[in-house]
Image (cartoon, rainbow, N blue to C red):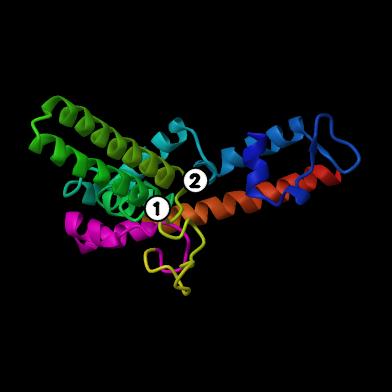
Amino acid sequence: MMAMVMGMFEARSMRIGQTGGSGLMSREQVVGALGAVSGRHPLGWLAAQAEHGGESSTLAQLTAHLRTRLTAHSAHCATLPELTLAIYLRRPLPEQLRSLVAKHPRWDRERRRAAKLKVLITKEKEKGGEAEAARLQATHDEILTAARVRCEQEIMTTGRCPKCAGTGKMLRKGGDCAVCNGTGKVVPDMGIIERMAGVAAVRAVHQALDELESAATTFKRALRKRLEGEREQ
């Protein structure tokens, strides 16, 4: 919890000690402030936690909120709440993930490695080495599976653009990365939402996202004010 609070603000502005004093806030003061502010701003607290690596229970509560918020549109797309939360967290939508993996340098490197094995597999089959061809095929499949899993985990965990590694720039060619438009982050494709649930659903999703962002901002502002008040006492 302390790490999460520190992550919400500049580390220098939130100095926390075991017992407080000398310009430090005690952990008890932080917990007390957090309890008071989160009680008044429950949605903002959930949204802020999600932004800073919230636990599965937090994400489940936000999904439940979005399910209620988007009830009128979920009939056309049962996973609309989950997709909306993915967009809020700057994570790719499921349909985007495969194409993003294909842009990851690790995938490209392992794909070329697997391609070399494919050549050997063909040669083994031509000379009747079925057993060796089967062994090489298994290795080929394991390489691609492991690479796909590793790339997917990195993209979903960090939210960084796999093409530019989060820099927003094309290292060799220069200029902004064409995959993330120079943001360095995964850009969720709202066109997927429109195709699955319609234009009205896209508007509703944008409104829900604005609501979460506003709630998180209000919560952080209130928490900072409360913590500054605790520090001055």
> In this orientation, which residue lies closer to the viewer: 36 or 171?
171
Q: Residue furthest front?
A: 127
How many neighbours does mark 1 have within 10 angstroms: few (below 14), some (14-19), or many (20 or more)?
Answer: some
Magenta span dominant secondary structure: helix
Which disc number belongs to residue 105? 1
- Residue 191 pos. (x, y %): 25, 62
Q: Residue at x 51, y 47 (%)?
A: 51
> In this orientation, which residue lies closer to the viewer: 190 or 135?
135
Examine the structure image and report whether residue 206 is included in the region drawn in magenta. Answer: yes
Residue 68 seen in this snapshot: no
Q: In the image, what residue type sits under mark 2?
A: Ala
**Does residue 168 appear left or right of residue 197 in this picture?**
right
Examine the structure image and report whether residue 154 is included in the region drawn in magenta. Answer: no
**Above-or-below relation of 217 to 7:** below
Q: Residue furthest right?
A: 22
Which part of the image, by quadrant, shows the N terminus?
top right
Residue 96 seen in this snapshot: yes
Q: Residue at x 38, y 44 (%)?
A: 151
How many neighbours does mark 2 have within 10 angstroms: few (below 14), some (14-19), or many (20 or more)?
Answer: many
Q: Which is closer to the viewer, label 2 or label 1? A: 1
The stretch in magenta equals 180-207
**Does residue 129 appear left or right of residue 69 in this picture?**
left
Q: Residue at x 33, y 48 (%)?
A: 69
Which disc number belongs to residue 47? 2
Which disc number belongs to residue 35? none
- Residue 197 pos. (x, y %): 19, 55
- Residue 86 pos. (x, y %): 37, 48
**Does residue 125 appear left or right of residue 44 in this picture?**
left
Q: Residue at x 76, y 34 (%)?
A: 29
Q: In the image, what residue type sits under mark 1?
A: Pro
